[in-house]
Image (spheres, rainbow, N blue to C red):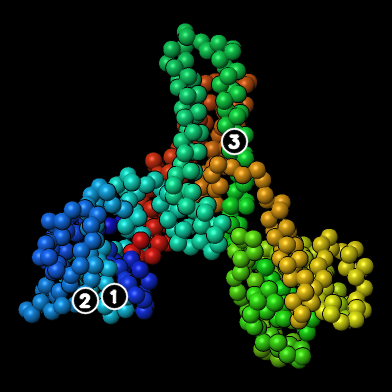
Amino acid sequence: MIRADCNDTIAAVATSIGEAGIGIVRISGKDALSIADKLFISRNKQKPSQVKTHTMHYGWIIDAVSAGKEIIDEVILTVMRSPRSYTKEDIVEINCHGGIIALRSVLDVVLASGARLAQPGEFTQRAFLNGRIDLAQAEAVLDIIRAKTDSALKISLAQLKGDLSKQISSIRRVILDVLSALEANIDFPDEEISPANLKGLVQHLKNTEQKLQGILQASGYGRILREGVNVVICGRPNVGKSSLLNSILRQERAIVTPVAGTTRDTIEETINIKGIPIKIVDTAGIIEPRDLVEKKAVLRAKESMRLADLVILVFDGSKKLTADDRELIKRLNKKTVLALVNKIDLKQKIEKGKIVEIFDRIVSVSAKKNKNIRLLEDAIFDLICKARLVHPEPALVTNLRHIERLKGVQKFIARAANSLDNALSFEFIAQDLKDALMYLDEIVGRRFSEDLLDKIFSEFCIGK
């Protein structure tokens, strides 16, 4: 049994806990309707088990186990009968008032009437186990919930719709066709594959390998859309790092003063630049620390720089390069760096030519006057994404698990094509193709383990 007894009727709050106009308690399983019959009093006296599927009904939830059958909340109850529901089981959704007490009270009486509290992701897991969606589509549900930009949401919706699964099926059919031809020859060696047909099989595998190569090339961009990137603002004290953060965010997020060393800790915010979720981190100025607090602030700044996908190194354009500037340039020689000259609203003294010699991309801005911030955003996007932008594939792969499996498929297909081209034993080639099929099946869940399902669905919230 996977994680929990799938014969149980489960229930959970399916909306965020907190003050809201509406909150939903979801019930799924064979006893969903009978539990609702005990708890729900309809205005027209109909029981949930008597109504048509996909209908909504006004009434009240009562505490069926108490002697007085006290009214818990005024609700709208929705009935969705199997198999036309999210889990392909009978589902009842109770739309009650969204306050935390109302939601918990309704859930408590549902649990007291025979339902079990759902585990994280158990509704979606049942949708997968009952065949409504495959495993790749199930993972897309979580991506939709976590999407930070419109672009990430669009990709996740395409995967939920089945775009990736269709690609997998297409690749799988090619492998099966080639494998069937090879195994027929293994079983009946007298019926040899003609040279022309053999050449055709090799070409089918090579075309599929190229298709996989295109999907994997696009996956770098897909991963960025799904997970975002870390961009760290660094520089010596008082070059305008916090002003730059405020300017990018279009709000006063960081405290700005003329006093050097005002920022004593990292400040993190997420923004959307051309559909890419960007985590911007403002760091303390890199200086020789004067006290324990500054020492810890500098250590955090250095750690943020080490983990960054992109570092924005800020220089004060109104002053000449200092020893601290040069030390930071030296420290960042192995990172992707965008050099930024700030304070162009003041008289310029910086030796920009010396910076040009080191960095390919330099942007000049005035954070205080909000000048050239759009140019900065364009530069951030180009440095992070431009090299990863390729011809769009029908399905953009964003999930690391899928990417690793597809790399394995590509390896096995390339090896099989090469072996077939060199007239090696069909038995070994057939095994490579079977291994490729196994990896494809793991992506969509034709083949899975309990540990894999535990790992995937434990990341979901309870109620989804």
Q: Residue at x 93, y 67 (%)?
A: 353
Is residue 286 in view from this perspective?
A: no
Crowdedness near tag 3: few (<14), some (14–19) or many (≥20) residues, C-alpha within 10 Å: some
Q: Is residue 458 left or right of residue 6?
A: right
Tag 1 and tag 2, C-beta contact below 8 Å: yes
**Residue placed under numbered mark 2 in the picture:** 73
Tag 3 and tag 1, C-beta contact below 8 Å: no
Q: Which is closer to the viewer, label 2 or label 3?
A: 2
Q: Residue at x 14, y 67 (%)?
A: 42
Q: Is residue 88 left or right of residue 134?
A: left
Q: Secondary structure at mark 3?
A: helix
Q: Residue furthest left?
A: 67
Task: Mark 2 or mark 3: name the one nearer the start of the chain.
Answer: 2
Task: Determine which quarter of the picture holds residue 455.
Answer: bottom left
Q: Nearer the viewer, residue 386 or 426?
A: 386
Q: Residue at x 79, y 77 (%)?
A: 366
Q: Nearer the viewer, residue 193 or 254?
A: 254
Q: Nearer the viewer, residue 84 or 279?
A: 84
**Residue 79: % across, % down:** 22, 58
